């Protein structure tokens, strides 16, 4: 009952704030301009079947228009993060985009799609996927596992080849979101140089993948995450990080501008985060 009351209050305040302050189609950009964080969720895999037996490949994830529509009706969400890093699927982008644009939607949800890294299938395939993903209705694309400055420049060029205008500190009127992820120690060591590049929107540290690359050293991964955050702030870029009910208030205070939740406690975590952010 208490959460229902909170949701109704958020719905009313969200409608009022958006009407009064919206300057961009992607309202997360307006939040960032005010120094406030945006909150989102991973699009949940809708495949109810088994995830695969030992020695067999996992069953493919399923994302539908109906699933997107359900997410669109939740007033807590500013953005939805569709993770296609492991298995790219342009049809999933289209379905999720259509669902999020449902007439039943509470506010406009920004759709950010993570595609496979450049190293997996090569630069030209990644370039095509960025263009295809945006054409299918995504508001932004995440390119994971950027390995160095040269690859960061290459990733930025993918967005320049599209017919969209990327929001960045040097282009505050842009709408498309371009996100780069640093997920190994060598890339993090070049965070300052990468943050200094123009033409993209979000710089993030993939703390889970980085911890694995560091042999499970979570303390070192956290230190690297803070380093990337410092460089993102200096460059006036947004920084995205996963969070939960236990650490979301801390992450808000640290200055992460995009916080990503998942699972059954996502709404609780976002409610706590919004309160901490004065939203």
Image (spheres, helix red, strand yellow):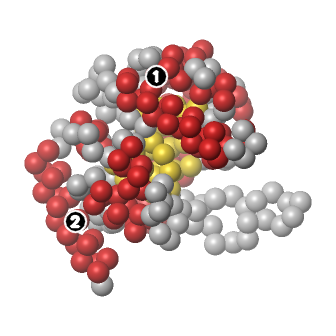
Q: Quadrant of the N terminus?
A: bottom left
Q: Quadrant of the C terminus?
A: bottom left
Q: Could you say whether the residue bearing mark 1 is in a helix, strand or loop?
A: helix
Residue occupied by mark 1: 195
Decide: few, some or many residues near mark 1? Use Cα within 10 Å; few <14, some 14-19, many ≥20.
many
Question: Does label 2 or label 1 sit earlier along the sequence?
Answer: 2
Q: Is residue 24 left or right of residue 166?
A: left
Badge count: 2
- Quarter of the image where one finds residue 202: top left
For the point 79% across and 65% down, the residue is 52
Given residues 133 and 11, the one toward you in this image is: 11
Q: CA distance from mark 2 to mark 1?
A: 35 Å
For the point 23% across and 65% down, the residue is 10
Residue 252 in the image: above or below residue 47: above
Q: Could you say whether the residue bearing mark 2 is in a helix, strand or loop?
A: helix
Q: Is residue 51 left or right of residue 198?
A: right
**Can residue 84 be spotted in the picture?**
yes
Q: Position of residue 114 (x, y in %)?
A: 55, 42
Residue 266 in the image: above or below residue 172: below
- Quarter of the image where one finds residue 189: top right
Q: Position of residue 39 (x, y in %)?
A: 37, 53
**Can residue 177 be spotted in the picture?**
no
Q: Residue furthest left?
A: 20
Q: Position of residue 222 (x, y in %)?
A: 57, 42
Residue occupied by mark 2: 11
Given residues 262 and 58, the one toward you in this image is: 262
Residue 117 in the image: above or below residue 21: above
For the point 87% across and 64% down, the residue is 54
Q: Is residue 124 left or right of residue 91?
A: right
Q: Residue furthest bottom?
A: 1
Q: Position of residue 29 (x, y in %)?
A: 29, 38
Residue 5 in the image: above or below residue 100: below
């Amino acid at each position: 009952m208490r959460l229902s009351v909170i949701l109704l209050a958020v719905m009313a305040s969200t409608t009022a704030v958006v009407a009064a302050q919206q300057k961009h189609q992607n309202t997360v950009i307006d939040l960032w301009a005010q120094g406030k964080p945006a909150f989102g969720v991973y699009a949940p895999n809708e495949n109810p079947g088994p995830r695969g037996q030992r020695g067999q490949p996992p069953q493919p994830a399923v994302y539908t228009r109906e699933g997107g529509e359900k997410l669109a009706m939740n007033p807590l969400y500013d953005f939805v993060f569709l993770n296609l890093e492991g298995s790219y699927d342009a049809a999933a982008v289209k379905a999720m985009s259509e669902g999020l644009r449902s007439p039943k939607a509470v506010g406009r949800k920004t759709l950010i799609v993570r595609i496979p890294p450049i190293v997996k299938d090569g630069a030209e395939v990644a370039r095509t996927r960025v263009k295809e993903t945006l054409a299918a209705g995504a508001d932004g694309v995440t390119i994971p596992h950027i390995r160095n400055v040269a690859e960061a420049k290459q990733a930025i060029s993918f967005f320049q080849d599209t017919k969209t205008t990327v929001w960045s500190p040097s282009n505050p009127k842009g709408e498309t979101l371009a996100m780069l992820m640093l997920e190994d120690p060598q890339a993090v060591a070049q965070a300052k140089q990468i943050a200094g590049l123009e033409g993209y929107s979000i710089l993030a540290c993939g703390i889970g993948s980085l911890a694995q690359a560091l042999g499970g050293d979570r303390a070192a991964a956290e230190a690297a995450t803070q380093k990337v955050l410092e460089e993102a702030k200096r460059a006036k870029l947004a920084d995205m990080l996963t969070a939960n009910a236990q650490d979301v208030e801390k992450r808000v205070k640290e200055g992460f501008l995009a916080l990503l939740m998942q699972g059954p406690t996502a709404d609780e975590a976002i409610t706590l985060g919004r309160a901490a952010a004065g939203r």
